[in-house]
């Protein structure tokens, strides 16, 4: 009888703890962020370059950066560190695109694709993973893309 209670208790703790499969975490990604990733991979496909994989750690880093660029619109973080210091894993190559004011994913992608440096990041064949952050503050949209090679 004691073993049944222990198994039941462990099962309840597992359920209560909110353990989720990693694939379920994409439900916390906004539609705008998902659309940017889709548009990035469309552009890469047109250029014959492999798609980027969404990375949840990069998504979290982008959310931090999106908030930071509402304070200081720069590739340097408000504390003076490089924008890449927000990435929580060792990346063999990294890139960042930032933007503000574009109202939707299509508009921000159009802006980035018409800027050579941003376009180069989007179409860089060395990158394998992407994160996107989007924040609306005071009716202004802020956008971040982080690219990495794992």
Image (tube, rainbow, N blue to C red):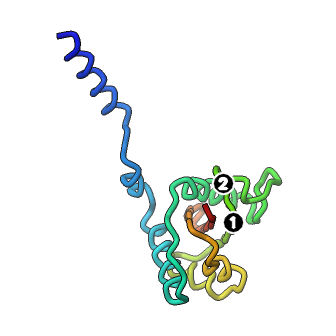
Q: Is residue 99 above or below residue 42?
A: above
Q: Earlier in the sequence, mark 2 or mark 1?
A: 2
109 vs 26, left or right, is right
- The front one of 83 and 121 is 121
Find residue 94 and name its label. Answer: 1
135 vs 9, left or right, is right
110 vs 8, left or right, is right
Q: Residues within 10 Å of mark 2 (few under 14, many from 20)?
A: some
Quarter assignment of residue 135: bottom right
Quarter assignment of residue 133: bottom right
Q: Is residue 110 above or below residue 148?
A: below
Q: Dot 2: what SS?
A: loop
Provide the residue designation for mark 2: 87
Image location of residue 51, percent across then percent down: 50, 75
Instruction: Tell me what residue is drawn at x 62 percent, y 67 percent.
Output: 147
Instruction: Tell me what residue is drawn at x 67 percent, y 59 percent.
Output: 91
Instruction: Tell me what residue is drawn at x 68 percent, y 68 percent.
Output: 96
Image location of residue 130, percent across then percent down: 56, 66
- Residues marked 2 and 1 touching at CB (< 8 Å): yes
């Amino acid at each position: 009888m004691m073993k049944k209670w222990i198994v039941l208790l462990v099962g309840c703790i597992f359920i209560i703890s909110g353990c989720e499969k990693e694939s379920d975490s994409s439900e916390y990604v906004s539609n705008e962020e998902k659309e940017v990733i889709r548009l990035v991979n469309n552009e890469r496909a047109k250029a014959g370059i492999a798609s980027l994989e969404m990375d949840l750690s990069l998504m979290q880093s982008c959310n931090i950066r999106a908030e930071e660029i509402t304070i200081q619109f720069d590739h340097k973080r408000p504390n003076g560190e490089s924008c890449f210091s927000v990435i929580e894993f060792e990346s063999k190559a990294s890139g960042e695109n930032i933007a503000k004011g574009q109202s939707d994913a299509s508009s921000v992608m159009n802006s980035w694709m018409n800027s050579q440096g941003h376009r180069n990041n989007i179409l860089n064949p060395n990158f394998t993973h992407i994160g996107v952050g989007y924040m609306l503050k005071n009716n202004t949209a802020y956008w971040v893309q982080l690219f990495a090679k794992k």
